[in-house]
Amino acid sequence: DLGAPAFPGKDFQDRFLSRVKPVYYLRTRQYSRSVSQPPFIVNFQGCIFRSYPGHYQTLLDTGTGRYRKVVGSDVRPGLGEFKEQLTDALRESGAIAKKEDEGALFGFLRTGYKTSTWWEDER
């Protein structure tokens, strides 16, 4: 609400925007992860994609300009869950060590106790 007389109030904007459905959703993210073997740092990226009314897809960049589908879901994953899905795909391909090989303490120190942001938490 800008407070100007020509702009509608916040309540009108909220009622209007709550009825609009997004048709496409694309959110890209880049991450890096340290490993104990050369090259010691693995850079990876991926995106969450949805074409309404389809489901959300977690896509991993293959490095050749193409994306590979990792997971599909009817509910949009949070950013922490999205990062974990990409990491699991890298574990399956052998690019990084398995979770069992890292150890529980090291895994906790890498992710922390909270993997979601405040707006992704259940209310």
Image: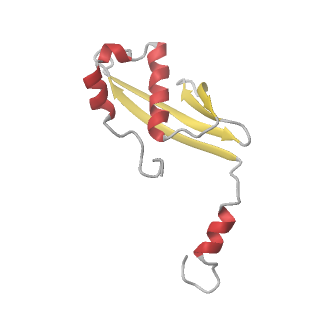
Q: Quadrant of residue 40?
A: top left
Which sits in the foreground, 115 or 25? 115
Left or right position of 98 against 81: left
Identity of the residue furthest to the bottom in this view: 5
Left or right position of 100 against 3: left
Picture coordinates of residue 1, whole percent (x, y) = 55, 76
Identity of the residue furthest to the right in this view: 53
Q: Quadrant of residue 39?
A: top left
Give the residue drawn at x 56%, y 43%.
Answer: 27
Which sits in the foreground, 103 or 2? 103
Picture colour scheme: secondary structure
Give the residue drawn at x 48%, y 48%.
Answer: 122
Q: Is residue 69 above or below residue 17?
A: above
Left or right position of 19 against 100: right
Identity of the residue furthest to the front in this view: 123
Q: Is residue 3 above or below residue 76?
A: below
Picture coordinates of residue 116, whole percent (x, y) = 42, 43
Q: Is residue 60 above or below residue 13?
A: above
Picture coordinates of residue 10, whole percent (x, y) = 58, 74
Give the residue drawn at x 38%, y 31%.
Answer: 32
Q: Is residue 13 above or below residue 93?
A: below
Give the residue drawn at x 70%, y 60%.
Answer: 19
Picture coordinates of residue 110, whole percent (x, y) = 30, 30
Marks counted in the figure total: 0
